[in-house]
Amino acid sequence: MTLAYAHPAKSMNVDSIKGIIRSKMDSVSFDSWIAPLMGTVDNGIVHFVAANQFSADFIKSAYIHILRGAAMECGLDAQISVGRFASAPVIPINDNVETKDFEIKDSKTEIRGFDDFILSEENSFAMTALKKIAGGRVTFSPLFIYGPEGCGKSLLAGCLNGMAAGKILHMSGAQFVSEFQRAITERTIFAFKDFVRNCDTFILDDVQALCGKRATSEKFQVLLVDLVRMKKNVVLTANAAPSSLTGFDRRMQSVLASGLVVDIIAPNRTVRKSMLCRAGVRADVADAIAARADANGHIVAGLCKKISAWQEMTGAAVTLDVAERLLVDSLQKRKTPLAMARSMAAKLGVSFDDVTSKSRVRPVVRARQIMMAAFKSATNLSLAEIGRIVGGRDHATVLYALAQIEKQKSSDLVLAAEIEQMIRECK
């Protein structure tokens, strides 16, 4: 017959009780939350001291039953409080990002639905994937959505945030960098990582904000792998495909591309017209404006607000003449080759300065070749003129680029669609 008995309380100390706790939970959670605790044993109570209120609250909600169970084996009770003597792992700072107050605001204050996004046929695949995620867990996580500025990536992320079930964590890339830096300086990095893991769906807008920030991107890569392994839904958005995000190493690029990668295009003329009609613009006026408006959702939204404000203040409908006068500073004039080149570079996720430089970095060379191919099909420019626009390349270089892109288009349907989109926007 085996007898159960309590350890004599006087012979026990905090480290001994931690040893009992370690046997009752996984090593990662123990090292993250319990190991940093300081404490004392006094009057039949083991007093655990956490470094900050966040840690104390989390341990109380998740592990207090384990702490009390271990203390009870020693004939003690357990309490947890906050104090300045608690220790925490110190991680070297390796990012030059300004520190802000640690605060992740609830991004569900404005509830959006998928109907807020005006859908075109080219973007239906991305929409279908997001609706699958909103309906429950999926097998294609992470979903990586990329496209040029103003194509609606953040709007789609907001729609998912409003429609998905369970606990949603929605952050921008810049916010992630800031909060990560804050967690390092305040020595709450484990708390921050567990905070991110403790969700059903994780949405990160503008992943490119992490490019070039080695420490942050390395920790994010670990978090991303953990989230996928835990079968969480992960949605990432960026202005370029994973392989074109030049500030990440190949390992990071491969992790980003390990799920479902989907591109979305900028609002075409039909979508731009629908946006204007929703703002109360007459159909004929909306059609005329859409034909000249830039293919950028932010700019079109600005046009809608300007028209709505004018109608509200004057009480009159906007005619075509009024629209021409009202939007003269916003509607496109004839596109110059230089303006086309800058627009293409932005859509490809590279800087125009890099394209025109002597850089031989693979993503830059690829973007340069794609731009040459788009110019050849969309304009009447000679090969020599195209070469001058992209940094003074000679006739032979342009010919080689065209041959390379033509060869790749036959096996890369995404590339072919991307070039066709650029050609349409140039004409």
Image (spheres, rainbow, N blue to C red):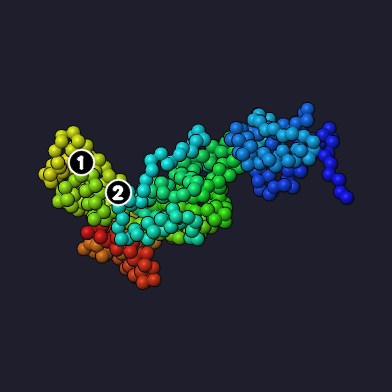
Q: Position of residue 211 (x, y in %)?
A: 47, 49
**In screen coordinates, is 140 left or right of 12?**
left
- Foreground residue, 330 or 85? 85
- What element does badge 1 sit on? helix
Determine the residue positioned at 67% across, 35% down. 87
- Residues under numbered marks 2 and 1 in contact, where contact means CB atoms less than 8 Å apart: no
Residue drawn at point x = 61 percent, y = 33 percent: 52
Pick out the residue farthest to the front. Answer: 1
Closer to the eye: label 2 or 1 = 1
- Residue at the limit of the structure toward the left, as seen here: 321
Q: Nearer the viewer, residue 256 or 227?
A: 227
**Foreground residue among 158 and 378:** 158
Residue type, mark 1 in image: Ile
What residue sits right under mark 2 in the picture?
297
Marker disc for residue 237: none
Q: Position of residue 140 (x, y in %)?
A: 48, 60
Label 2: element kind? helix
Where is residue 356, by image quadrant?
bottom left
Q: Residue at x 78, y 27 (%)?
A: 43
